[in-house]
Amino acid sequence: MVQVEWLQRWLNRAGVFVAAALLIKFALDFGAQMAFWLAAPFGLLVAAAIAIASINAFANRQDDALRRRGKARALLLAALPLGFLASSLDCMGLSVAGCSRVCTAIKLVVIPVIALASSAYFRTADARLLFGIGLFSFVTLIPHCVCYNPANGWWIDNLGASPVCYVWGFMVSMIALGALGDSGRVCGLWRSAMQ
């Protein structure tokens, strides 16, 4: 199990770097096209998300108290599919079909698989499930979105499709996976809040 936890930790760290790069680009593109009073809070949100994800991914913690805390673990596991669902609703609303086949597959296959794996992890605490959720989270970053807006415009112009549609759901998953894994520190706050 130690090997899987080590792989999950490094997958999470790589994910934080990828999410940070995509969100910083998103914030810069958004800021270039929007008024300062709209762009500044968005930039602060990006900075806060990157800080929390980085603390969870790179801190060293040897206790597994969070794994024993039912409420905190349940909330973090629920955040995994809900973050992607929120990204999906933001883009396509309640429609089943997305702007591309990949978008539709993410909504109809990837998000439910993440939800099932999260539920299974809640029951079993099997580290392989967290690793699988991390891998499935990366699938959402395949460039697929063709909705032209300030976040996607540069990507569509240069790649033909954007990887940013689910980036907030991906960041939520990196925060939650880092907190659930053996390296999360921010969860110490959860411990006292959930008692």
Image: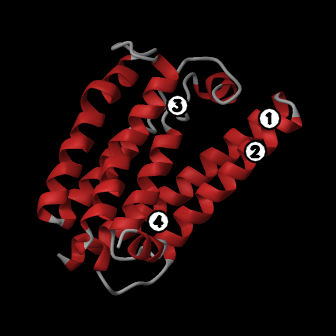
Q: Is residue 61 left or right of residue 148?
A: left
Q: Residue at x 24, y 65 (%)?
A: 70
Secondary structure beneath dot 2 equals: helix
Q: Which residue is mark 2?
A: 41
Q: Report how far apart the C-alphas of labels 2 and 1 lie in the structure.
A: 6 Å
4 or 1: tag closer to the N-terminus: 4
Residue 180 in which image quadrant: bottom left
Quadrant of the drawing holding the C terminus: bottom left
Q: Report how far apart the C-alphas of labels 4 and 1 lie in the structure.
A: 30 Å
Residue 101 location in percent, x, y?
36, 17
Vertical placement of residue 109 versus 44, above or below: above
Number of marks in the image?
4
Which amino acid is tagged 1?
Answer: Leu
Q: Which residue is mark 3?
A: 165
Residue 182 in which image quadrant: bottom left
Residue 91 location in percent, x, y?
51, 22
Q: Which residue is mark 1?
A: 38
Q: Report how far apart the C-alphas of labels 4 and 2 lie in the structure.
A: 25 Å
Residue furthest front as drawn:
195
Which amino acid is tagged 2?
Answer: Pro
How packed is label 1: few (under 14 Cα within 10 Å), some, or many (20 or more)? Answer: few
Q: Residue at x 40, y 84 (%)?
A: 61
How packed is label 2: few (under 14 Cα within 10 Å), some, or many (20 or more)? Answer: few
4 or 3: tag closer to the N-terminus: 4
Secondary structure beneath dot 4 equals: helix
Vertical placement of residue 148 versus 60, above or below: above
